[in-house]
Amino acid sequence: MEDTICAISTSLGVGAISIVRLSGPEAIAITNKIYKGKDLTKVESHTINYGHIYENDKIIDEVLVSVMRAPKTFTTEDVVEINCHGGIASTNKILELLLTNGCRLAEPGEFTKRAFLNGRIDLIEAEAVSDIINAQTENSRSLAINQLTGELSRIIQNLRQEILSLMANIEVNIDFPEYEDAEEITHNVLKPKLKDIKAKLLEILNESNNSKIIKEGIDVAIIGRPNVGKSSILNSLLEENKAIVTNIAGTTRDIVEGSIILAGIKINFIDTAGIRKTEDLVEKIGVDKSLATIDKADLVILVLNNNEKLLPEDQELLTKIKKKKHIIFVNKCDLSSTLTLSEDIKNEIIRGNTIEPNGLNDLKKAIVEMFNLESFSQKDLTYLSNARQISLVKRAIKIIDEVEEQLNNEVPVDFLTVDIKNCWDLLGEIIGATYKDELIDELFSKFCLGK
């Protein structure tokens, strides 16, 4: 990290302003080479300076340049941000001049990576930066902000401190048995301490099961036979003509997706091809994708026609979705009914049509209630937010389970220190106190350029 990096930090396109960011030991000096105004090497830190970017004697753009000196910056290095007009040509030209004068183009996420490696933020906070950028709902934004402010990091750090104290006491007991001020860690002492740590980890894990819903939303597959009105239902829910609707069976041959927000959570509706036996190769591919979507979806909405009798294909789908979260939507209830359903599924049925709003409103309400979505806005959203973090907590819990089993088998306490340390290391990986270079490279490669 001895070089100076630069990148465009705003979306490239037509807009009011663009920001080109630099970080590194030569950030101020390099900017000063192409800038005319105050001498940037002499201005105070954390100031905004008016001037122009030049290429030789030619004005490129009128700019405001923010100068922030180390260590009180995001990366803890000297940072410069050039605020220019938001045109593609002028922004790219400024970037080109910086590269010509000694900068290196930043890799994706390299500014945040430098902040992590320089100790400005931990790994949870670094991942939260990306989550904030990608947040699509208020709840997902709140989840990311809670991580960025260090709330979750403090919880993990406190647990690591408890484990560290245990390890230290065990080591003292082993190396200095005559030292009476240290608590003796016997089986009876260690068991409740580990039980308490595991309980806290399980609480974090259980709460974090909601994080996927908050970040990614709920995938809802709309399935059924051809011509039961799936595409019309999707269009009505989205309030736009997303899917093509005709009277011809098999019009939808591939999945069509769209999203809405319910109770602060993103609901991803997936309209699927009508499921039936067919010899048409293209339609068959669509049917196979529809069946695969059922398995992947968090919720399945099976659409049946109110004015048609239950067919064998409908019965097969009813059987297929039994073990999935599901809702049966009886469509076209404005028409006379010929559909008969068994009493044992009456609590799973919502009736409606795409002409009047009541049935679809009941459908939305059922989704909110099924996933208890309104509770998310009332909770303190301090969760683990990705598979990496959750996997590490699960592994730490598994180690504690193994240690508890060994304690029940009267294995001496000093034989368990390696396992206890492994648990401490795993929690350290969550916040980046311990890490592998390959993991860090992989994590930050998923960030956008300029962040």
Image (tube, helix red, strand yellow):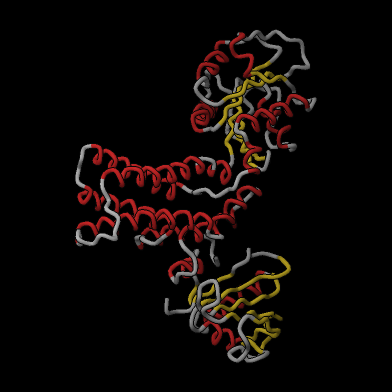
- Decide if residue 219 is in sight here: yes
| Vertical side of 362 occupied by 44: above or below | below
Residue 358 at x, y percent in the picture: 77, 25
Residue plotted at (61% across, 83% down): 45
Tell me which residue sits at (54%, 28%) in the image.
290
In the depicted structure, whether residue 428 falls above or below residue 137: below
Closer to the camera in the image, 441 or 162: 162
User: Residue 283: which quarter of the image?
Assistant: top right
Question: Which of the image's four quarters has the N terminus?
Answer: bottom left
Residue 395 visible from this viewpoint: no
Quadrant showing the C terminus: bottom right
Furthest toward the front, the residue is 180
Q: Nearer the viewer, residue 212 or 359?
A: 212
Position in image of residue 232 (x %, y %): 71, 28
Residue 175 in which image quadrant = bottom left
Left or right of 364, for residue 405: left
- Going by the image, does 287 lie left or right of 48? left
Residue shown at 42% from the left, 55% from the top? 430
**Count of numbered marks:** 0
Q: Foreground: 59 or 259?
A: 259
Q: Is residue 233 above or below residue 56?
A: above
Query: Residue at the location (50% across, 75% down)?
Result: 76
- Image coordinates of residue 85 in percent, x first then y, are 70, 73
Left-right relation of 14 to 156: right
Residue 15 versus residue 450: which sits nearer the camera?
450
- Name which quarter of the figure residue 377 lies in: top right
The image position of residue 160, as x and y in percent, is: 39, 56
